[in-house]
Amino acid sequence: AQKVTQAQTEISVVEKEDVTLDCVYETRDTTYYLFWYKQPPSGELVFLIRRNSFDEQNEISGRYSWNFQKSTSSFNFTITASQVVDSAVYFCALSERGSTLGRLYFGRGTQLTVWP
Amino acid sequence: SAVISQKPSRDICQRGTSLTIQCQVDSQVTMMFWYRQQPGQSLTLIATANQGSEATYESGFVIDKFPISRPNLTFSTLTVSNMSPEDSSIYLCSVSDGIHTDTQYFGPGTRLTVL
């Protein structure tokens, strides 16, 4: 079974629109970590955020915000006032304390295209 | 975060040959990881490489096909052996920052095409 599900394969928006990328995870561990990474067309994976399972505070960083809800096992990512440079594949990932240290489970990714 | 480089950045290889990919980090790190990303797909962990010990391979990956070296705390290599077109992928190395050991930072990747 998929540990991380990103149901949205592709999303297209027009510049300045807000967009939310969904991530649902599955784990039996009580201690775990959730991540978002961005992969622009150049291919490198850029770390965006790490959140541990005991910290449900939402986080905002500029135009980016993250909504972590343990009750629904979701860790959604919102981009406000999207820009063309936001176009990329975005991956949500999970690390479980009970498994091999550092083992990351990735979702399938969401391709975001922002049109001018 | 650590600065990670990979060589080569891309290559086109013939079936049946082998390619060694290098991963260099600008600081000492405990854990290094190798991932494969097939076209249009997500990332799959190949193996975890710790200095001074044998690499730990994930299910579906074997040492004969993907031998890994980790001679020191700043360097690792992954060899893709006896390549076939199915090996065409992006190969990425990543490192743990040693402080928040579950945060991994990735290299720029190596785009491999096998003809």
Image (cartoon, coloured by chain):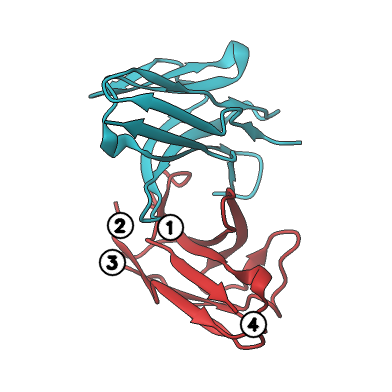
- The chain holding disc 3 is B
* Label located before the other in sequence (1 or 4): 4
Tell me the CA gap for discs 1 and 3: 11 Å
Q: Mark 1 against mark 4, which lies toward the viewer?
A: 4
Secondary structure under the numbered disc 4 in the rendered image: loop
Horizontally, residue A5 falls left or right of residue A111, namely right
Q: How many marks?
A: 4
User: Which residue is label 2 attached to?
Assistant: B2
Q: Tell me whether marks 4 and 2 sit on the same chain.
A: yes
Tell me the CA gap for discs 1 and 2: 8 Å
Tell me the CA gap for discs 1 and 4: 23 Å
The foreground one among A38 and A50 is: A38
User: Which residue is label 4 attached to?
Assistant: B81
Secondary structure under the numbered disc 1 in the rendered image: strand
| Contact between labelled residues 2 and 1, with CB atoms less than 8 Å apart | yes
| Contact between labelled residues 2 and 3, with CB atoms less than 8 Å apart | yes
User: Which residue is label 1 attached to?
Assistant: B95
